[in-house]
Image (cartoon, helix red, strand yellow):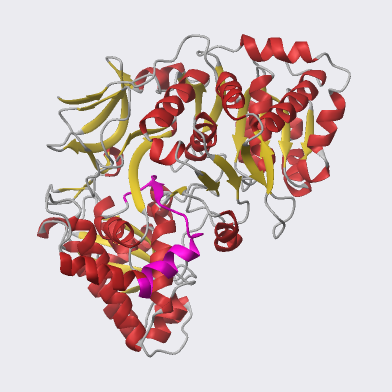
Amino acid sequence: MTLATSPALVEVPEGTSINTILADRVARSGDEALIERRDAPDGPWIKVSASQFEDEVLAVARGLVARGIKAGDRVAIMSRTRYEWTLLDFAIWAAGAGAVPVYETSSAEQVQWILSDSDVRLIVVETAAHAETVKQVRSALPSLEDILVLDEDAVLDLRKAGTNLSAGIVAERRDAVRRDDLATVIYTSGSTGRPKGVELTHGNFAHLTMNAAVGIPELLRAENARTLLFLPLAHVFARFVEVATIAGQAVLGHAPDIKNLVADLGTFRPTYLLAVPRVFEKVYNSAEQKASSGLKAKIFAWSARVAEDYSRALDVPAGPGGALKVQHAIADRLVYSKLKATMGGQLSWAVSGGAPLGDRLGHFFRGACVTILEGYGLTETTAPTSVNLPGKIVMGSVGPAFFGTDVSIADDGEVLLRGPHIFRGYRNQPELTREAFVDGWFRTGDIGRLDEHNHLHITGRKKEIIVTAGGKNVAPAVLEDRMRAHPIVSQVVVVGDQRPFIGALVTLDAEMLPGWCAANGLPKLSVSEARVHERVLAELDKVVAQANEAVSKAESIRKIMVLDLDFTEANGYLTPSIKVKRSKVIADFAGTIDALYGAPAPAASSQAAATR
């Protein structure tokens, strides 16, 4: 068993809670901005001071108490990422209750399971459509007393409800919350089976956020630090940053519509962001596509090489040489400065999680405009359990153990974790909770290794390891991640369990396809046309060959099938956190996979695939 440990920078006393984190920020910041909010998509950013936010939190908390919410009750939130979600989170905590996040894209069946399993008494939804979703299953939710709608003045109604309630009652509730009390129940997005309710305490959040504020001051305590939150607040990663921003000294903003993200970045001007690798892939691919032909394409390709060379040079003692510095300065004027401008002009740092980023993108962005700190965590670890730190970056790794965390690699390669940020258990599933731990260590289900710097490298999921007919163990993630880096590739599912060789199902990115076609002298192709077009298939052959460079011959992809659809949340093949539901894909496309390996082709359908 291999072990790496990192001492905590801040110890969390028993009386600490997320409520005390806000109170401490109010004491530090007072009338300084804590949040900037918008009342309209194209409206101005309006300053909300720390004191103003606390006053509004307490007013909404009084409304919750007036409506009968008791200490220890659960209140659900179903909404996009917006100011009111953060307000409700802190109001629920101030009332001594637990918050239950629900993805705004959830089906009625998913809503029923989450609200019933967590025994929710009140749900606040964003829209009337969300309310209708809840009403479809309300007869199966005896504990649910009411549905409030943000777009129908839910916050104002709560404030009014608490007008005649003594402020002292909420103060007592808030002050009574302790480190080990339940803060939230977050349901895993369910890439396999029914979602599990992960119970996270105030202490879990307090440990991570208070240590992050001290340990990563470049992000959370820098002068004019600000971040724009656009990932779903139903996800643990976004909830961590929501609290960490307040634990630090940064200003928080919300971007509810990803379609307006570029415009929002330009007006909010964040200094740090959190995102998933797909966001950085899209930024890179879009920039490359804008310089799609002729001299512009050559300049972008040259600038990308310079950025990667410059970043790699930062990792050696001598640093970038004089000639490389000159090239970098020229590339900055020609390309990097424009890329910086699209992200608001002030962005210096980003944190990436959820999937591997890849060396190429990591080096490009660090060399061009923004240093991406790749990290690793799960819902059960309250988000980050390891992360690269400024000045301690090892590209391709997910960094050293986070402050106060122990990381161990079991004999079979599984990553085991221990620390104050580990969840207290799965709701209503004691047997599953017991199975998740071994000798006090949390079993992540991920396969990894520790390098000579004690940085963690994640190589795959234990349950996703493919064993070929020849007995070769293959981790699909490295192949899938490399292929997804190409602009026209949307999703990849590597297959080959008990098969003679490794294959893959590939979907095309309909958004990026037109630009790629134009840059390559092709007419505009639909996905149906592109999946059988000789030039597209030849390009995918190159993508496969490049991905195969990362693995042995026995692990390499020999054949692919290009599907006539993409995997999306709407069609049930992606989770809300953009993870492929591998088991569902393999089950639903069993016939297609059989065809890839030479079995009789399935009956013709809209899900037919082209072979290459």
- Front-most of residues 17 and 477: 17
Does residue 106 lie above or below 439 as drawn? Answer: below
Split into 4 quadrants, where in the image is the C terminus? bottom left
Q: Position of residue 591 (x, y in %)?
A: 37, 61
Instruction: Give, as a single range, the part of the protein colored magenta.
Output: 333-356
**Could you say which is closer to the camera, residue 13 or residue 135?**
13
- Answer above or below: position of 174 versus 42: above
Give the answer, above or below, for where 60 lies relative to 297: above
- Left or right placement of residue 122 versus residue 483 in this view: right
Q: At which x and y percent is residue 23? A: 61, 21
Residue 598 visible, this angle: no
In the displayed structure, 254 sits above or below 444; it is below
* Residue at x 18%, y 62% (from the top left corner): 548
Q: Is residue 347 magenta?
A: yes
| Quarter of the figure with residue 440 | top left
Please provide percent x and percent y for residue 62. Answer: 78, 21
**In percent of the image, x 50 and y 58: which residue is there?**
568
Location of residue 93 (image quadrant): top right
